[in-house]
Structures are given as structure tokens and as C-alpha cells.
């Protein structure tokens, strides 16, 4: 393991989690914006995406209590990973190297949504 991962503080863990979550959330928002034709369409799309995302994030109902197929679906939700990072950082002081399994899904979601949004915007411009 890289030595700087072992020496990272809880604040560094939180910074990395916030950065990855913000990138993923911006990517989702830009993708909704690229797909939508009007502002009203974008608001409806955001509503129909964000309400299930909040419900399936584990904020009100633990993910462990959900059915197995829904637990697999929640890995496509960056809010689920971010809530785990927040709880682990604030309540337990978990170091960054123990939360890498929560960081890589947010990184993958951010990479996919940002590149897809850029491709959709470029395609619409021509």
C-alpha cells in the first residue's frame, strides 16, 4: 500500500469523499441537462432520479435491510457511497485506505457521467 494512504488524516478522507461525490453529482446533473430538451423536462428528470436515489441511499432505511437485487442497484448511486464515507469518517474516524471500496464506485460514476454528458453536449452542438 502507498505510504501516504496510511498517514492520511480523517479530514483528508472527508476531502476525498466530498470531491468524488461532487464530481459524481455534477456528472449526473450535466447528463440530465444534456438529455433534456427544455428546463421543465430537466426538472422532471431530476425529480424522478433524485427521489429514488435518496430513498435507496441508506439514509432512512439501511441498505442491509433491502432485498438483495436492490442492494446491487444501490451501487450505482453515489449518495450511498458518500453516506458510508460520512458515517465512517465522523463516527469512527476511519482512515482513507479502509474506504477505498466506497471511493471507486463514486469515481466510476463520475467518469461515466461526465464523459457521457460531454459526448451528448458535443453531439447536440453539431
Image (tube, grey):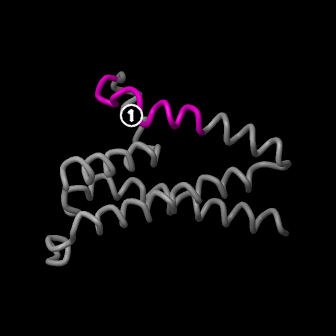
* Image coordinates for residue 60, horizontal then vertical, percent: 41, 28
Residue at x-position 33% and y-position 25%: 68
Residue farthest along the bottom direction in this orientation: 3
Residue 70 left/right relative to 117:
left
- Image quarter where the N terminus lies is bottom left
Return the residue at label 1. 58
Residue 17 occupies which quadrant of the picture? Answer: bottom left
Residue at x-position 34% and y-position 31%: 63
Eyeballing the image, is 44 above or below 98? above
Residue 35 left/right relative to 31:
right
Element under disc 1:
loop
Within-10-Å neighbours for mark 1: few <14, some 14–19, many 20+:
many
First to last magenta residue range:
50-65
Eyeballing the image, is 74 above or below 18? above
- Image quarter where the C terminus lies is bottom right
User: Number of numbered discs present?
Assistant: 1
Residue at x-position 55% and y-position 55%: 25
Residue 16 left/right relative to 24:
left
Eyeballing the image, is 87 above or below 4? above
In the rendered structure, does residue 83 fall within the stretch colored magenta?
A: no
Please name whichever residue, 13 or 117, is drawn nearer the observer in this view of the structure. 13
* Image coordinates for residue 105, horizontal then vertical, percent: 39, 53
Residue 76 left/right relative to 16:
right
Residue at x-position 25% and y-position 56%: 99
* Image coordinates for residue 59, horizontal then vertical, percent: 41, 34
In the rendered structure, does residue 64 fall within the stretch colored magenta?
A: yes
Amino acid at each position: 500500500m502507498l505510504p501516504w494512504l496510511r498517514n492520511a488524516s480523517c479530514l483528508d478522507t472527508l476531502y476525498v469523499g466530498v470531491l468524488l461525490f461532487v464530481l459524481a453529482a455534477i456528472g449526473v446533473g450535466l447528463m440530465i441537462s444534456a438529455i433534456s430538451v427544455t428546463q421543465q423536462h430537466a426538472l422532471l428528470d431530476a425529480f424522478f432520479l433524485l427521489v429514488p436515489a435518496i430513498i435507496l441511499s441508506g439514509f432512512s432505511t439501511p441498505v442491509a435491510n433491502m432485498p438483495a437485487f436492490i442492494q446491487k442497484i444501490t451501487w450505482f448511486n453515489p449518495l450511498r457511497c458518500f453516506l458510508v464515507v460520512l458515517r465512517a469518517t465522523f463516527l469512527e474516524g476511519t482512515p482513507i485506505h479502509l474506504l477505498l471500496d466506497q471511493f471507486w464506485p463514486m469515481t466510476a460514476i463520475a467518469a461515466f457521467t461526465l464523459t457521457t454528458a460531454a459526448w451528448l453536449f458535443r453531439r447536440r452542438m453539431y
